[in-house]
Structure formats: structure tokens, C-alpha cells
Image (spheres, grey):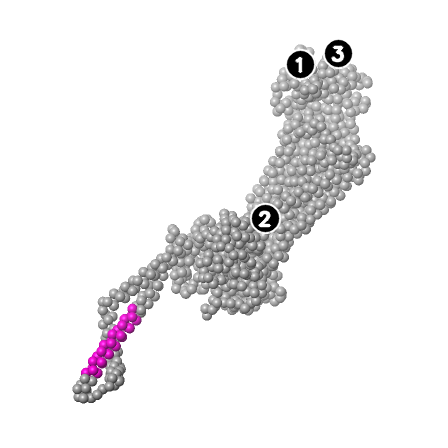
Amino acid sequence: MENNKIAFGKRPKNPLHRRVWKDMLRDWKRYLMICIMLVVTIGFVSGMYVANNSMLNTLDINVDAMKREDGHFLLSKKADEAALKAICSGELADVPTVYRERAYKEAADEVEKAVNDALEEKVEEQVKEAIKTQVTAAVDEQINSAKAMGAAVSDAELESMISSAYDTAIAENYDKAYREALKSAKSSEDYSKALADAIDEAKKEINKEIDDKYDELADRYGLNDKFDAVPVTVYELFYKDTNEALPSDSNYSGTIRVYGQRSDIDLYDILKGRAPQNENEILIDRMHADNANIKVGDTISVGNKDFQVVGLAAFVDYSALYESNTDTMFDALTFDIGMTTDEGFEQIRANTNANYAFTYDHKPADEYEEKTLSENFLKALITQTAVSDTEDLEIKDYVPSYANQALTFANDDIGKDKVMGEILLYILTAVLAFIFAVTISTTLEQESSVIGTLRASGYTRGELLRYYMSAPLLIVIIASVIGNALGYTVFKKIVADMYYSSYSLPGFETLWTPEAFIRTTLVPIVLMLIINLIVITKTLKLSPLRFLKHDLKQKKRKKAIRLPKWKFFQRFRIRVFMQNIPNYLMLFVGITFVMLLITMAVGMPETLSYYQDSMGDMAFAEDQIILSSTEDDDGNTITTNTDGAERFSIASLQRKSDAYNEEVAIYGIIENSRYVKLNSCDDNSVYISRAFSEKYNVNIGDTITLSEKYEHKDYKWKVYDIYDYSAGVAVFMNNEQFNRIFEKDTDDFSGYISDNKITDISKEYIAKEITSQDMMKVADQLDHSMGSYMTYFQYVCFIVAAIILYLLTKIIIEKNERSISMTKILGYENGEIASIYLVPTAVVVFFSEFLALYIGYKLMAFFWKLIMMKMSGWFAFILPASGFVKEFLLVFAAYLLITVIDFIRIRKIPKVLALKNME
Amino acid sequence: MSNEERKFLEVRELKKSFGSGDTRQEVLKGLDFTVAKGEFCVLLGPSGSGKSTLLNILGGIDSADSGEIFINGDKLAEMSEKNLTGYRRKHLGYVFQMYNLIPNLNVKENIETGAYLSDKPLDIDELLKILGLYEHRHKLPNQLSGGQQQRVSIGRAIVKNPDILLCDEPTGALDYKTSKEILQLIEEVNKKYGNTIIMVTHNEAIKQMADHVIKLRDGKIRHDIINKEKLTAAEIEW
């Protein structure tokens, strides 16, 4: 040390930076677990975003590219050229004028005929009277001459003479006389005046009637409101609904809606094969084909005719296979869409539905404008159909595209999934961030003296904060990068496949989605940053001296809590428990989170299978037939001889709300019905279904307001009672009450219900048949779309539960490593030590599970209701006792697995640890 | 030595107590002393005499109830938390009885944690040689003996070439031989780099190698002696 010259070096880079990597390497299991969980979640959510965004973008592009309709309407029959031209104009038809002219014309003829009839009768009488007078006078003269000559004429002879003379006179002169008299009468002023008066009177009556009716109509449809013409282009898009059968599967029975060749509107994306080229070929929906296992080259029966499937496609107007827009759920299992050539279409023997698609000539700028356009066009359509020369032309259905579930459901659902995935990601990130924070605060405790020394040496809080924040942030960043990379590759495909298994979607191109990157990278980073920042900053605020003294407790416990005189081990465990309360709280939060996921994974299939099993029992009758007309072609009322069949009425109203306009079925039931047993109530009271009551929280005595769909007409009813029917949102009332309320004839009805299948009504009169099988469609489709994923999801939940439990129990053991080591030195055996340190955790897990079960169930029921409020129909979230047991066991099994690892961990703690210098 | 040089560190009327009410205990009862620049000062006293508390206050990691501390003319009490950290960073080096090394950083890296704090740190390799740790520089702390670990901790404190090196019982956990080696090292460091060293110890023998000995008992200075005939670390025995 003779050389006193001081050598200076360069300031090194912060060695703590290097330590971050070393820390991560040292504790690689924990970091790896957290990283994997984040990678999978971020990857999945990113994949969801990418797939969603790309898919939605494709659907958006396809609106133009595939010439998607702006809406469609179904007429009772094919409209003539003139009617279509008028509809295309989008102008309101002058209904009163047209009706008046028609009525006048009809009335004028009738009035004239009536006046003429009366006149003719009068003239005839007058002419005949005149002739009789003349004849009588002539005969009298002849008799008088004869009497003067002495001839005797009896009265009988006189009568006979007059009669014979009268007959001769009538035969010879009447016609001429009548014609002349009639001619002269008709040319008289009196006649003209009488006729004009009669016509005027008739017109007055007609005007009054038409004005009254039109006023009512105008009021209903807002025909007198401000109206701008909505010119549209209308396309014939006729279809036939008929049975679909698969020669390969005799058990299968479905419905197919077949269209003729599409070329100008509602095109399709062929995913496999080609378009039909002759009358024996058909292109069908890809989704349905997958479900029904139909391949290109297969033959299917469409009604009476066999077709060869030459291609599978996604039709732009059927991204979700809704048979009717009022169905609760689409049905890709038993409902199919097909397209054949026009010749092939002709050959299918089934009722042709006069469906017309339309596009607006001036595209609306936004959805509000679209709604206005749609409302205005409906007015034009109603009035133009009303004035059409085609006899009995009626609108059967009108569906603007924004309200068409077949078009919008997939879009909406894809959007909703994104939100769900995102929420899940944030919750999981928050849970992981908390785990990180707890881990770090344990590390801060363990490294207390090092931190104290570093702080005493002059390291700032900021420097230490940045150091301790580095690992969690690095993990999130790494997970984000890998997750996003997987999102664009693996998960995008998984998510897309999920959608392809529910919806009929076209092929799509992957789109760079900045939103995915931001949401799956920035948000988790910020979450991780904030949560860790709060926890670490709180501890780092303490003075260096407190770190040096290992005095990190924010609140000092003045005295140790006294415990009752229990056995030593018991007290030891309680001490361990009390010492780890913050960690146990974290454990509880983690278990609750996992339980929420598991409730979803277990509850959804349970709910669906419950409805699948009980839907048949829920239906009040096995078969419901709604007639298109209650009279047959000969004007006779359609009847059925089916045993137990009853007449019933049905109407559809809407329960309007900001969130969702629910379609409510209104049933009119005959008195003493064997299917729906109602007590009589007054006209202002009704029964509502249990589903209605549960979904909208309506109880006996409450008032419900339902509205006509296309009219501004509301109905307010008091709830008389709740009818135990869970299969649909419905209102029940007596049939007579129904007919009074909806202003129908007293004996009016809509169809028949029966427990036996109704087979003796000709198909042409049946508008819709609902069997209990149909009601299960919803549950079947939901089960098909989600059920299989839920099983996988249960496994995922088990893994997540195990990882979270692993991470949290690891912290508890690490915190106690030194004490465990010390107890080993004292001579305790591994089993005893495990019973001290593992039993409190087991008890906490056990009780946490019960509480978490309840919270998870409540939360899930709440989320479920949120989802259901945006859908038509209602399923209550159902979790039977077995579901709770399954959930409990899943988590407990995960815990037991981790306990084994924990036990090994405890065994591995060396005795020397306690003797090592910590300070 | 001028009067100003003697007053490199000046403590006036320093008081400190812990607790409140009945349990209130006065640890420092008004201390006055000065330490010169480059001086090797030993704070001596039995357990509970307040020497560690004094050292912590001098190091800016604890605060006094009253009194003043000036270091090179700067008043310590007036410094904000941030300035105190800066003060420690620039001017102080700390050595504790426990070495408090970062377990997963090797010897060199542990010393670098100190070097990083200085704009002009000592040459680490040379320092490692002085510390006798050059060949162990890639080892982790748990591969070293207690004495070696303490050397690392001294290295970490000294590498930023602090004005004052505060040592709190640096040999407290070491055996005789190792203790002597550490004392020799501190002595060498003091000589070579000229840092002021304030060392807390209860080992009476160490006072022989100090320039300045302050003896505390019951929170008061009992003796404040300038040692004119100091021995080298090698010469002292206990």
C-alpha cells in the first residue's frame, strides 16, 4: 500500500439491471408460470381481436362486394309489374283517393242499377195500368153496344172478355209502350235528379267510411307525418321452405330454404366446390353442411326432389341461420339454406314464398338515417300494397337489414365476445399483478437488509422502485410480444374456427389490428405497473433504518394476541395463520376468480342440458299449429279431428326498452283448456309466463306495457298471476278476452294446440308448426356452439386454479422458510411441519371455496342476465347441487395437487438455512 | 491542522430519544464533538450507549430530536429527504456488522453496486486486489467466508471513494484473525484514499489504532481523546 496514487475507473452500468435477469432465472418456475398464463390469455384475446376485426372487416366489405340487401319483405303472393314499380318509387300511395275511386265506381253502378230497377218497375206498372184502362174501356163499349142490341152478357163472360182483350193488348202493345214510356221517363229531369241524389248520398257514406278508416290507418302508421320518398331497387328473391333429408342419415330431419339462382342481390362466398350448373345440383350453407356432415358430392332430398351438393357457401344474408327473425336462436343444426338453378327451383314442389329483397337507391349515411329510411319505406310499402291491383296482396313480413338477426347476430356476437375476452384478460392480469405484488413484498421483506444497505449507501427510492418493477414489467412485455405473435398465428385460427363452428362466415383475410396490440399490451402493462407501483411504493417509503432493522410492518402490533389454552400444534397453526393473513386474503381473491371462471365452465353446460332435458316438458302442448288462414278455399272453417286439439290465438307484441326490444308472444286460450289452465280475470289483467317474470323482474300486481311492432299502439295490463311456463317470454289470456282486445270476431282463432301431432290439416294452410322438438333448438344450438368449449374450459380452469394456488402457497412457504428450517433443527419431522404450515392453508382454501362458490355463482348469474337481456327469450342460469360439488372438487383437486408440490418443497428446505447469516 | 480542518464533521448538542411517555428513553443526551478530515475516529462504548444511533444519525438514515450536525459546513438537519439521499450517495460509505450483500450478484457486481453511485469511482480491479478478492471476483457471496464477505462489503462502500466511511461493528461477527485482517484493510484504505472513517465498536483494543477516540456511556460522551501514539492494526491485540 506504499503507492498512494489513486486509480479511478469508469462508472459501471447499473448492476441491478443485470440482477433483474438473474432474479428471473433464479425463480424461473414462478416467472414461467405467470408468463405462460399471460401468454395464453394475451394470445387468446389478441387472437380474438385479430380474428374479430378481420372477420368484421370482411363482413363489412361484403355488404357491398356481395351486394347485401338493405332489407326484404314477404308478400302473400307475387306482385304484378305495376305494384313493384310503385313500391320501387318509394312514394306513399294516395290510398283514400284510390279507394274512393274504386268505391265510387262500384257505388255508381249499384246506385244507377237500383234507381233504374225502381224506375222500370214503376213504368211497367204505369203502362200496364194504362193498357188495362184502355182495354176495359173498349170492352165496356163493346158490351154496351151488345146490350143495346139485346144480347145478355154475364159477369163471368165480361171478365173473360176483358182478360182476353188485356192479354192481346199486352202482347201487341206493351213492349213498345213500355220502351217509349221508359225512354221518356229516363229523359225526364226528375230521373236525372233522383239518380244524382242517390249517388251523392252513396258517396257521402263512402267518404265517411274511407276517411275514418284512413285516419285510423294514418294514425297507426304515421302516414301523415313528414315523409320523404325512399326510392329502392327491388329484387325477386323467392324461396321455398321444405324438408331436407339425408339419404345417408335416416334419423335426420331438417328444413331447407331453397332459392333460385342469385345473381343481382345477396350473393355468396363459395368456400368449397362450385355453383350449381343444372337443375339437379345445389349449393348449400357451409355451416349447416359441417353440422349435418354433408359433403360436396353428397345427395340430399329437398322436398320431393334429390339434388347433388356441388358446393358449400356462406350466403351474405345468412351469417347466422335464423329460420325466422323472431326465433330466439339461430339453428345451424336442422335449418339449411340452399341455392339451385331456376329450373331446379321450379321442380321443387312446395309453396313459393314471394320474398323480395331491396336496396336503397340512396344509401343511408348512418344507422339513424337507415332507421328513418326503413320506417318511411315501410309506409310506402304498406300503402302501395294496399292500392295494388293484385287481389289480396298483403305484407307477410318486413325485415330491414339492421333488424335482421340472420345478418346482425354474428356481428353483434363477435363484438360481444371481444368485450368478454378483454374483461377476462384484465381480471387475470390484475390477479397476476397482485400475485406479483405479493411476491415482491415478500422479497422486500427477505431482502430488507440489502435494501437498507443500498438505501443507506445512497440508492434512491426511484432506483430501487425501477429495479423491483422491472421483473413484472418485463414478464408482461415478453408475454405481450409472444402472446401477440401467437395471437396473429395460432390463436387467430382457433378463434376463427370457433366462429366458423357457429356462424356461416365467409373466408377472411388477416388484418393488422392496432387495437389488439394496444389492448393486449398497453392495458396489461399499465395494470401491472399500477398495482405493483402501489404495493412497492408503499413499502419503499419506509426509512433505510427500518429496512436495516427488518421493521417493515406498516402497522405495529403492540402485543401478541393471546390464544386459549389449546394444544401446542393448534396454537402454532393459528399463529401461522395470523402471520399470513394478507397472503390468505390474496389466496381467497385468487380462488374467487378461478371459481367465477369455473362457474361459467360448469354452469353453462349445466344450464343448457337442463333446458335440453326439460324443454319438452316445458311446452304446454306437444304440437302447436298456427294457420295461415282459418278458412279453407271453400270458405269453411279449418278443423281437426286430432284427439285433444284445442283452438288458440296468438299474437306478437314488443316489450320495448333501450337495451333490447323483446318479442312477446300473446296467447289466447279457450276456457277450461286442458293445456293452459287459467282462472278468469278481467280485460285489464293477464297471466305472464315465469320466463317473463324472471327476465324482467315482474310480479303479480305489476303493470306491463307491450306495444305493437309496426304501430304506435300500446297495451297496458296488470299481472294477474304468473303462469309456470319457462320456455318463452309470453302473456296468457282467455281467448274471448284476446279477441276483444285485438278487435277480432268473437269466434276468431289462430290455430290449434294438441298433445297429439296434428296431421289432418293440409300444409298449405299451416303458417308455422312448433313442436316441443323445435323449442329445444335453442338449447341444442347453444350447446353446439359453446358446450364443447366449456369442457376444455373446465380443464383450463383447473390449470389456472393450480397455477394460482401454486404461486400463492409458494409465497407462504417462502416467507416461512427460515422458521420451517428452524423447526427442522429443533427436531420436528417433515409430517409435523407440513401439518403446521399446510393445514392452515388447507382450511383457508376449504372455506374460501365455499364463499367463492357463492360469489362466483352470484356474479355469473348477474353476467348471465346481462347477456340474456340482449337476447330474445330467457334461460335462467341454473347450477344444480352437483354443479357446485363439481366446482368445489375441481378447485380442491387442484389444491391437493399443489399440496403435494408444497410438501416436497417443505422437505427440501435445508436445516442450515436458519443458521445462515441473513443480515 | 487548522481549526476549520478539525471541524470537517461537527456535532453540536445532539439529542435523541425513543418511545414516549413512561417508556421514553433518552439515548443521546446532548453530544458535542468534531472530527477532522481523513481522521480514523472510533466510537467506543458498551451496548445501549447510543453509538449505533449516533452513527445512523451521522449517516442520515436516522434523525436527531435536536442539535446540529455540519459536514464540511453543510447542515445535515436542513436537508430534505431527497438531499439526504444525495448526501449519502456522494459523501458516505456504509459498512455494517452483517455484510448485506446481494446474494445473486458476484463479488465484482456487488462492488459495482457501490461504484454505480459515483461519477468517479475507484478502479474496481485495483480495489479488488487491495481487498484480496481479485481471484474471487466471480464468486457469489455464499461461496465466500465471513471475512471475505466483509471485504466485499467494505469494497462496496469504499469504491465510490466517499468522504466519510461509516463502519458499524464491522468485525462484530468475525473471529480474531479475520477481524484483524479487516482492521488492517480499513487502515490501508484510510491511508491510501484519505477517507474520514468513523467506526462504531465495543472492542476497546481498536481504540489504539484510531486517531480519535470518543467514548460513550449512557448517551453521553465520557472521553473525547486524540490519540497521539496510535498503533497499526497489526500491532493491536485483544
Say yes or no: labels 3 and 2 on the same chain.
no
Residue type at numbered disc 3:
Lys
Crowd tier of the residue under label 3, counting other residues whose Cα lies within 10 Å: few below 14, some 14–19, many 20 or above:
few
* Badge 3 element: loop
Q: Which residue is mark 1?
A: B13
Crowd tier of the residue under label 1, counting other residues whose Cα lies within 10 Å: few below 14, some 14–19, many 20 or above:
some
Frontmost residue, B94 versus A555: A555
Per the rendered image, the range of residues in magenta is A115-142
Q: Quadrant of residue B191?
A: top right
Report whether residue A457 is seen: no
Left or right for A182, reference A592: left
Q: CA distance from mark 3 to mark 2?
A: 87 Å
Q: State the residue at coordinates (82%, 35%).
A: A827
Q: State the residue at coordinates (59%, 60%).
A: A773
Residue A501 is situated, as x and y percent measured from the top left of the image, at 60, 55
Crowd tier of the residue under label 2, counting other residues whose Cα lies within 10 Å: few below 14, some 14–19, many 20 or above:
some
Left or right for A340, reference A581: left
